[in-house]
């Protein structure tokens, strides 16, 4: 199995040279402690934990999987110890309030921590990752008592959390949720129902598990307006070990992330506590949805990086035939794979998606920092502004980056040839693990609908595209006169115009034919992803060029490789955007004209 090395050079390049996180942290109310020394310590300590403790469990965890015995889920060998090490390091509360035991550092640092942990071993990262969802929900909507009781333990990491939304009949359409909540004693509720596909629903890593559950109060209105949110602990506080009517009915058998326990959870008159106002459960749940989605977008970056780290050494080692331009390793029986153009295409694609995606995620994480700053300063206007900016970026990141992570994992497998399909090399595991990222936390289709339908058309009538694409225009104008950056500048100016044109054309078409919002949405999302990544590759190219001329923290070869990868992205990957733009503009007829009965004549 390939080992994992944290890509610290790239992280530092982005944080220090492309985006200037040091100055960014000085603008935040919780940024004071995030000094360069502190950031460096976090990066290097996290890298050690990931490389030495978490990554070595990646393949063994996949082979062993989780098991359910007498109602208790057990994680694979080594997981409890690795999790204890994670907790002892205080990692869970890195970006959560000091008053509840956290370190109170900016959210972006939490995201970078999550990226390393997830790249080392996504299944492992799911356990603390799901807890973050519960922590954010309680922090935002819980009473002081709920925060004191639950948030403190969750922040320590001695208790873990889950998000229980999905039921057998609904995952996307949560208006169909049936789980019931009936008033119980002392303001509590009795929760009854079945949730499926619950990540970290049960496990042996912590002494208690805090479930955040969507359920309906008696007489609640039908649909999304009648759903409330509840805290339902596995064990009630002070009663650890005593049954609260929460049980894991089964473990799902699944394609990948096998060391992550995906549970059917039964709630049988379980005692729970309302969190947030009645019937506003979905709104409460979605408060932190944007940052949660960036957390899942990171999975795309993680798998592209992991795939690249695995396939690159293989391409240097494995030999096959001779390079078309003449022998590269004449003393050997054949040249290494890396000398063949088509293999280079596959490697560069993975590298471009991993590093381009990382830049997109770090930039978005700075927006999340500003949003949290608004919350900490009790400035609703500021909070709302950054939340809405994030709202535009997150479906693009989640949809595009997870699709590209999967593509990168497939390319890595291709680099290995038939050996990629054989378990021994560990590549097929990366491809299996990557597949889930496009499905949960909102499928790619749902991200696309959210982006085009809600964020672009309904909420902003294209303003969010105009606003973001201004970055591309500014880069274009500033760099047109620079011979080396001119190709990027031209291209970005063109894309900015095309992106807005595409948006206006779809907006006009939608006034006559609403189906176009759905038929165009996937291609629109992919176009937006390519466009956004182009901007971040141009930024990286400009920084690399500047550092080559004036000196930077990294060796010249690092910056040259950045420039070469940027060129590859613009020449070989970005052209795919044009196909998506063409497809998005096509009338709905070819997709919608056939009746549902005529999709087949041989079977239902
Ligand atoms: C391993 C794993 C872990 C998970 N972890 C959790 C968890 O921790 N907590 C939790 O609550 N859930 C979890 N889920 C559930 C996951 O979030 C859902 O499976 C996902 O949201 C999709 O819902 P669904 O499966 O019901 O698909 P459906 O909603 O039935 O969708 C099926 C297809 O139809 C498309 N579709 C649906 N509606 C529309 C529409 N209006 N327009 C266009 N296309 C549409 C979708 O994009 C999709 O392609 C997990 C799932 C898995 C497999």
Image (spheres, rainbow, N blue to C red):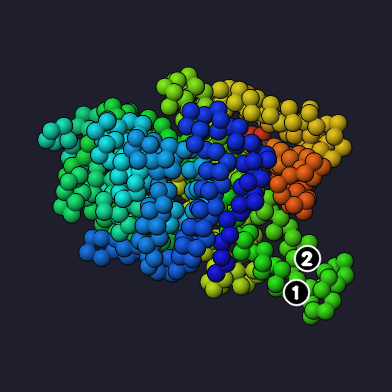
Viewer-side residue, 359 vs 281? 359
> Residue 204: which numbered mark, if any?
none
Q: The N terminus lies in which quarter of the figure?
A: bottom right
Looking at the image, can residue 249 be seen?
yes
Residue at the left extreme of this rendering? 185
Residue 594 lies in quadrant: top right
Q: Residue at x 25, y 65 (%)?
A: 69
Q: Residue at x 61, y 32 (%)?
A: 23
Q: Residue at x 20, y 32 (%)?
A: 218
Q: Secondary structure at mark 2?
A: loop
Q: Residue at x 25, y 60 (%)?
A: 72
Q: Is residue 400 left or right of residue 319?
A: left
Marked residue nearer the N-terminal end (1 or 2): 1
Q: Are marks 1 and 2 in contact (CB under 8 Å)?
A: yes
Residue 24 lies in quadrant: top right
**Residue topped by disc 2:** 340
Viewer-side residue, 588 vs 453? 453
Image x and y of residue 278, in percent:
26, 28
Ligand 1 within 8 Å of the CB at mark 1: no
Viewer-side residue, 511 vs 82? 82
In space, the residues marked 1 and 2 are separated at their CA atoms by: 9 Å
- Residue count near mark 1 (Cα–Cα under 10 Å), binned few <14, some 14–19, many ≥20: some
**Residue topped by disc 1:** 320
Q: Would you place residue 403 above or below residue 306 in this image?
A: above
Q: Secondary structure at mark 1?
A: loop
């Amino acid at each position: 199995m390939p080992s994992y090395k944290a890509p610290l050079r790239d992280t530092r390049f982005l944080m220090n040279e492309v985006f200037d996180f040091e100055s960014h942290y000085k603008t935040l109310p919780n940024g004071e402690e995030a000094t360069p020394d502190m950031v460096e310590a976090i990066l290097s300590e996290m890298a050690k934990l990931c490389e030495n403790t978490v990554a070595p469990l990646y393949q063994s965890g996949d082979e062993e999987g989780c098991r359910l015995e007498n109602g208790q889920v057990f994680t694979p060998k080594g997981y409890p110890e690795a999790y204890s090490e994670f907790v002892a390091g205080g990692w869970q509360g890195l970006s959560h309030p000091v008053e509840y035991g956290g370190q109170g550092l900016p959210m972006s640092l939490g995201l970078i921590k999550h990226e390393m942990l997830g790249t080392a071993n996504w299944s492992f990262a799911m356990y603390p990752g799901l807890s973050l969802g519960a922590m954010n929900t309680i922090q935002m909507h819980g009473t002081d008592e709920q925060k004191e009781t639950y948030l403190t333990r969750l922040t320590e990491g001695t208790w873990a959390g889950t998000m229980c939304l999905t039921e057998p009949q609904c995952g996307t359409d949560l208006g169909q949720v049936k789980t019931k909540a009936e008033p119980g004693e002392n303001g509590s509720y009795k929760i009854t129902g079945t949730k499926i596909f619950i990540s970290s629903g049960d496990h042996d890593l912590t002494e208690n598990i805090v479930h955040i559950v969507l359920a309906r109060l008696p007489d609640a209105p039908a649909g999304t307006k009648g759903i409330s949110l509840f805290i339902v602990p596995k064990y009630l506080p002070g009663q650890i070990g005593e049954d609260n009517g929460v049980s894991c009915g089964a473990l799902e058998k699944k394609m990948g992330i096998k060391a992550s326990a995906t549970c059917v959870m039964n709630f049988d008159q379980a005692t729970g506590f309302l969190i947030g106002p009645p019937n506003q459960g979905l709104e409460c749940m979605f408060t932190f949805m944007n940052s949660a989605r960036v957390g899942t977008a990171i999975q795309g970056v993680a798998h592209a990086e992991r795939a690249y780290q695995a396939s690159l050494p293989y391409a240097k080692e494995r030999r096959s035939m001779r390079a078309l331009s003449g022998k590269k390793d004449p003393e050997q029986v054949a040249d290494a794979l890396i000398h063949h153009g088509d293999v280079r295409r596959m490697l560069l694609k993975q590298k471009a998606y991993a590093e381009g995606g990382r830049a997109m995620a770090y930039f978005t994480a700075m927006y999340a920092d500003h949003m949290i700053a608004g919350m900490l300063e009790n400035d609703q206007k500021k909070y709302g502004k950054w939340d809405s900016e994030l709202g535009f970026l997150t479906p693009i990141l989640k949809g595009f980056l997870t699709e590209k992570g999967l593509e990168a994992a497939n390319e890595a497998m291709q680099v290995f040839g038939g050996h990629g399909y054989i378990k021994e090399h560990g590549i097929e595991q990366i491809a299996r693990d990557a597949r889930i990222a496009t499905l949960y936390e909102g499928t790619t289709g749902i991200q696309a609908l959210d982006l085009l339908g809600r964020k672009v058309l309904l909420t902003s009538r294209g303003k969010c595209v105009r606003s973001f694409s201004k970055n591309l225009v500014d880069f274009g104008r500033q760099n047109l006169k620079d011979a080396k950056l001119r190709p990027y500048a031209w291209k970005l100016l063109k894309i900015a115009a095309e992106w807005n044109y595409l948006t206006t054309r779809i907006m006009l078409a939608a006034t006559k034919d609403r189906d176009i919002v759905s038929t165009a949405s996937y291609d629109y999302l992919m176009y937006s992803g390519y466009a956004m990544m182009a901007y971040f590759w141009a930024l990286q190219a400009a920084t690399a060029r500047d550092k080559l001329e004036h000196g930077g923290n990294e060796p010249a070869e690092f910056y040259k490789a950045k420039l070469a990868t940027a060129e590859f992205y613009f020449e070989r990957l970005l052209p795919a955007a044009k196909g998506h733009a063409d497809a998005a503009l096509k009338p709905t007829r070819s997709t919608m004209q056939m009746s549902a009965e005529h999709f087949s004549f041989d079977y239902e």
